[in-house]
């Protein structure tokens, strides 16, 4: 098996990059490096994190400028070849803008920034991102993670929604929808199952000292699937 080597992309305006790095490097003791947005290659990294924040100030549309950062060409190549990518919050928006995931993220239905813990239902426990919620180290049907976003309202057309449902690509759903997302969608994968996008922040709920550890098992699922 391949040992995971995590790369956390840093865009101008990223503010959750250090949270992701801390969880992977110091909480889970994984080989982790920052990747600068102007780099042309992800190097030897084999798991890529597109972190939360406000890349390029969220001008135009959230993630629309970051999608054209130098490193994204290689991230797209990597993902299209089956490489593992997680887009968290703003990273989810970037992944949609880059065509790695279907749909788009709009302003919250309330038109207000939402920052609180939410309860999620784990809809698909068979993905490389959720196996530990099934028979792994932390079996759970529902988990609690924080959200912090103003543009988390997931939308797609009817055909795309049907495809997401038919192919079991909806991984997480909100129990109490904080942003108006279609069908309570909080996280999805691409059809191949190697790219995950989610608005809640697993990296901010990965150790008890911050109030909960439900999120660490997203990363532990990947680690266990590669070891």
Image (cartoon, rainbow, N blue to C red):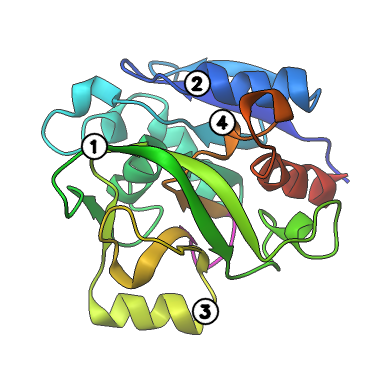
Q: Nearer the viewer, mark 4 or mark 3?
A: 4
Give neighbour class at mark 3: few <14, some 14-19, many 20+ (Cα, 10 Å). some
Gap in angstroms between the C-alphas marked 1 and 4 = 17 Å
Q: Which residue is mark 4?
A: 204
Q: CA distance from mark 1 to mark 3?
A: 31 Å
Residue in the foreground of this view, choosing between 198 and 177: 177
Question: Which image quarter: residue 153?
Answer: bottom left
Q: Nearer the viewer, residue 156 or 67?
A: 156
Circle number at residue 167: 3
Instruction: Kindly identify which residue carries mark 2.
Output: 17
**Quarter holding residue 66:** top left
The disc label shown at residue 113, or none:
1
Of the image marks 2 and 4, the number of the one nearer the N terminus: 2
Magenta portion: prevailing SS class: loop
Range drawn in magenta: 188-194
Mark 1 lies on a secondary structure that is loop
Q: Decide: few, some or many residues near mark 2? Use Cα within 10 Å; few <14, some 14-19, many ≥20.
A: many
Where is residue 12 shown, x and y percent of the image? 32, 15
Say if 191 sits above or below 219 in the image. Answer: below
């Amino acid at each position: 098996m391949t040992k995971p080597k995590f790369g956390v992309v840093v865009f101008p305006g990223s503010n959750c990059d250090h949270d992701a790095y801390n969880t992977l490097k110091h909480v889970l003791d994984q080989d982790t490096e920052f990747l600068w947005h102007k780099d042309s290659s992800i190097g030897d990294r084999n798991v890529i994190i597109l972190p939360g924040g406000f890349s390029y100030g969220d001008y135009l549309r959230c993630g629309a400028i970051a999608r054209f950062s130098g490193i994204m060409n290689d991230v797209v190549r990597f993902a299209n070849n089956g490489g593992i990518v997680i887009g968290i919050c703003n990273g989810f928006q970037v992944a949609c803008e880059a065509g790695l995931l279907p749909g788009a993220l709009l302003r919250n239905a309330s038109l207000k920034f939402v920052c609180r813990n939410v309860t999620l239902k784990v809809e698909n426990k068979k993905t490389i991102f959720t196996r530990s919620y099934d028979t792994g180290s932390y079996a759970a049907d529902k988990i609690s993670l924080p959200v912090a976003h103003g543009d988390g309202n997931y939308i797609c057309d009817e055909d795309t929604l049907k495809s997401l449902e038919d192919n079991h690509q909806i991984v997480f759903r909100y129990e109490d929808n904080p942003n108006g997302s279609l069908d309570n969608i909080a996280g999805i994968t691409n059809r191949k199952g190697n790219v995950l996008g989610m608005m809640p922040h697993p990296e901010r709920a990965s150790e008890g000292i911050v109030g909960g550890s439900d999120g660490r098992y997203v990363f532990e699922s990947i680690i266990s699937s590669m070891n």
